[in-house]
Image (cartoon, rainbow, N blue to C red):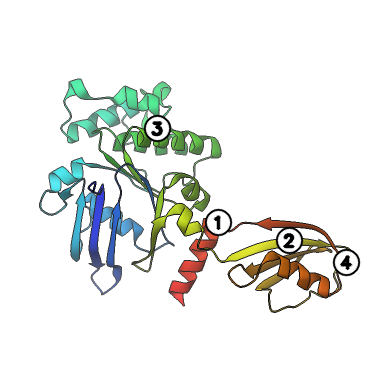
Amino acid sequence: MTQAAISIDTICKTYAGGKRALDGVTFDVPQGSIFGLLGPNGAGKSTLINILAGLVNKTSGRASIWGFDIDQHPRNAKASIGIVNQEILFDPFFTPVETLEIQAGLYGVPKAERRSRELLRAVHLEDKADAYARTLSGGMKRRLMVAKAMVHSPPVLVLDEPTAGVDIELRQQLWSYVQELNASGVTVVLTTHYLEEAETLCDRIAIINHGRLIANEPTRELVGKAQEKVVAVTVDRDVGEVPANACFHKIVLKGARTLEITYAKDRVNAGEVLDAVQEAGFGIVDVSTREPDLEDVFLSLTRAANA
């Protein structure tokens, strides 16, 4: 069995004052994957990332990066991971190429082996190599952070909300580069609030809520767990009163003649829902359905955990 790129074993973190940020979190990140780490604000994602980065001390548990225990082999563990934080962190008075050169020096990369301009080219910042970093736009700064995390060619890259505040075109460029890195063998761990990105990009997804792991499955299997499905039914006359039926989980009137009906696909099927609409005295003009997605599963799991 191939060793995991990151192995998390019953990690707990309790801050002074008693706040428990992580409560026995255990999972592995497979080598070569794009792995999604999702959860609501305050769930513990950033705490876990900061433990891996060596910025926060865990209370208990074990963690290893590329086979190196973060306590027993901290230097090797840190050399095996590049982290792009939510916060934009670099000196605004250095140019992008100077920023990367300094970062490479901190990691002990010999001058002959540094790839500063190559990395800037890869993140579409080659033309800004010698401009002051403070003059860059928000999206450019975010891409510079990705290049900064890759100066020592780590086998694992962690992206903590990398597309926050980035426009659509720059977001697509960033994901294109991340997918190229992944294709070259880099394992990518991604946290994001853009769930459609996670669903599209990630091979596997773990969800943390209130410091506990509540899901860890291949993306397709996780999305397949969604039990609610939505059907929009356009009827032949204006709806005066929304019909009620036991097979409807929720029904909402959208416009004068369109009923948006949510039902549990493990209990009823679309045919039964449409029969119920006709039994209420409506003729059906048009029908469209929406398949459940990662957002549906995410909301369902986090709400259940909060109950």
For the residues labelled 4 and 3, the Cα–Cα distance comes to 52 Å
First along the sequence among labels 1 and 2? 2
Three-letter code, disc 3: Glu
CB of mark 1 within 8 Å of CB of mark 2? no
Q: Nearer the viewer, residue 96 or 212?
A: 212
Question: Where is residue 206 shown, x and y percent of the image?
Answer: 38, 58
Residue plotted at (61% across, 56% down): 291
Q: Secondary structure at mark 4?
A: loop
On residue 232, the disc is: 2
Between the C-alphas of marks 1 and 3, the distance is 26 Å
* Amino acid found under the numbered disc labelled 4: Asp
| Residue corresponding to mark 1 | 293
Give the residue at mark 3.
180
Hey, which residue is sitting farthest left in the picture?
A: 72
Identity of the residue drawn at 46% across and 78% down:
307
CA distance for labels 2 and 3: 39 Å
Q: Residues within 10 Å of mark 2 (few under 14, many from 20)?
A: some
Separation of disc 4 and disc 2 at Cα? 15 Å
Counting from the top left corner in percent of width and height, residue 302 is at 46, 68
Q: What percent of the width, then of the height, locates residue 280?
A: 82, 75
Q: Which residue is mark 4?
A: 238
Q: Residues within 10 Å of mark 1 (few under 14, many from 20)?
A: some
